Amino acid sequence: MKDRLTIVVVEKDRERALLIMESLRAAGDHDIQVIGSESGLSRAISARNPDIVLVDMSSPSRDMLEELTLASAPMDRPVAIFVDKDDEGLAGAAIEAGVSAYVVDGLRPARLRPIMEAAIARFHMFTQMRKELAATKQALEERKIIDRAKGLLMKARGLDEEKAYALLRRTAMDQGKRVAEVAEALVTAAGLLG
């Protein structure tokens, strides 16, 4: 966890918000901002662009979770929710909404720092997994296009697979492009002509 975080605390109760701010200040020199209302929550969070969002409430509603989904999806930030009691199915809904930590039995000052660290670490882990998944999907799609282009060259020019790929690679090098780009152009052109 970096030394200075921008933290948004969502808490309606002023006294409780002050207690949380004191606990956060004891945990480090952080830029702490409090949002006291659930209405327009996604806009308020996005405007502040925090490193992490801490939500403290007795039991969040599904509307609140939708607001958090809106708030965390565009900018991708860790969100930790502290609830007093567990409502059946709400933990799962919170995780699906992108919440990094769902803590039952409220926000206790002594647990705050390790929970924030865990939420941030979990968020970064899932972010990395999403990037790797996207890269894998992209590579698979490129592989499919390259295979289709090789098939077109094999049929049109009577080449074997190795020579078809060598032709794609040589053309890509000559044009300063990636093999997948040349393959995609070939597949598109063949689609137009066929």
Image (cartoon, grey):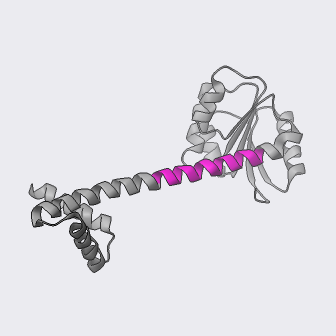
Please count the marks in the image: 0
State which quadrant residue 19 falls in. top right
Relative to the observer, which residue lies in front, 65 or 158?
158
Across and down, in percent, residue 184 comes to: 26, 61
160 lies above or below 126: below
| In this picture, residue 155 sits left or right of residue 64 | left
Q: Main secondary structure of the magenta part?
A: helix
Asked if one can make out residue 77 in the rendered structure from this viewpoint, the answer is no
Q: Quadrant of the N terminus?
A: bottom right
Residue 130 on the magenta span: yes
Across and down, in percent, residue 59 comes to: 72, 24
Asked if one can make out residue 87 in the rendered structure from this viewpoint, the answer is yes
Q: Residue at x 70, y 44 (%)?
A: 53
Q: Residue furthest bottom?
A: 174
Residue 95 on the magenta span: no
Relative to the observer, which residue lies in front, 101 or 44?
101
Q: Residue at x 60, y 26 (%)?
A: 62
142 lies above or below 67: below
Across and down, in percent, residue 175 comes to: 27, 77
- Boundaries of the magenta span: 116-134
State which quadrant residue 181 falls in. bottom left
Q: Residue at x 22, y 72 (%)?
A: 167
